Image (cartoon, rainbow, N blue to C red):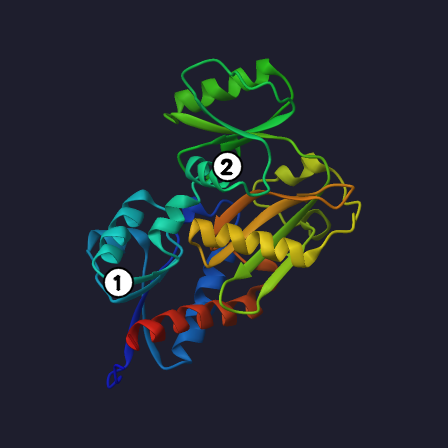
Amino acid sequence: MCLIHEKIRIVGISRSYEYSPNHVDNDAAIFKIVAQKLEEKDIDVEVWTEKEFVSQQIKANFIFDMARDRATIEYLKQLEDNGSVVVNSAYGIANCMRKSMTERLIRNGLAHPKSFIISTDGEFTPDIFPCWIKRGDSHAMVKEDVVYVECREKAEQVLADFRSRGIPEAVVNEHLVGDLVKFYGVQGTDFFFSFYPTEESHSKLGLEIVNGGTHGYPFDKDLLYRCSSAFAEILDVPIYGGDCIVSSTGEIRIIDFNDWPSFARCREEAGIKIAECIYNKVMAKLEE
């Protein structure tokens, strides 16, 4: 067992504002709370922006991050490969990009919408209207990255827009009818929170309106917790959030999954648990 004589140093990387559409303040707030909770555990927290972290080639044995920029992710992968503990892992963050996430969910047979990965260079071939067309190479940064379509003509327009913006591939998800439920979780802790975003006026890109009002269909919250935990495990993101659709019969299918969301509806409680998760991973490494 390693005996700790010096104060532990952890580097925190905040999220660049362009990856926080309509949630810049919320993302900054949860990051700040986690940093404060770690400091309360007698941890020396050193905070950097994504651009500063990469440009100055900052190194640390322990890192927590809300990174999304490709350059940050690639640099974090290098540090992880050389032994740094990174939460969430850069590999996990990359797994949550649409194409990678969809490939893993299909491969593992998890409950999600019928989905296709298509090139934006060709015609729109899936016949599953209505559906959602999402950029496949990244997380959504603007409203046009996730589009609801009801006909082939509109689908072709979306592909043309993706092409014009240099987006090579798209993920197509069938549109599911039912209640939209948002959830947050932190692996290794007892934290799990779910709610109806339409009732709470909680929105990032304003797309929730497509699902209409909430019916309050009964569903198994323990099953949602188990499903989301399985997603988190496969995607390697212990700090996570997402959205699911609950059908009128109570069937649950997850339609989106994100690495370290804003936790805006449960920020204080979540911040404590996220810090606990990070701290436990640091201590586990030190005790090897």
Residue that mark 1 sits on: 84
SS at mark 1? loop
Q: What residue is at 63 percent from the left and 17 percent from the top?
A: 151
| Rendering coords of residue 75 (x, y %) | 25, 50
- Dot 2 lies on which element? helix
| Crowd class of label 1 (few under 14; some 14 to 19; many from 20; radius 10 Å) | some
Q: Compared with residue 257, is residue 163 higher up or lower down, i.e. above or below?
A: above
Quadrant where the C terminus is found in the figure = bottom left
Which circle marks residue 267 in the picture?
Answer: none
Quadrant of the drawing holding the N terminus = bottom left
Number of residues whose C-alpha sits closer than 10 Å to that of mark 2, classed few (under 14), some (14–19) or many (20 or more): some
User: In which image quadrant can residue 96 be found?
Assistant: top left
Residue 118 left/right relative to 49 = right
Residue under label 2, please give it: 106
Relative to 136, say whether 204 is above or below.
Answer: below
Identify which amino acid the numbered label 2 is placed on. Ile
Choose top left, top right, bottom left or bottom right for residue 66: bottom left
Looking at the image, tell me whether mark 1 or mark 2 is earlier in sequence order: 1
Q: At 62% across and 37% down in the image, what residue appears?
A: 207
Residue 23 percent across, percent down from the top left = 52, 51
Q: Which amino acid does label 1 sit on?
A: Ser
> CB of mark 1 within 8 Å of CB of mark 2?
no
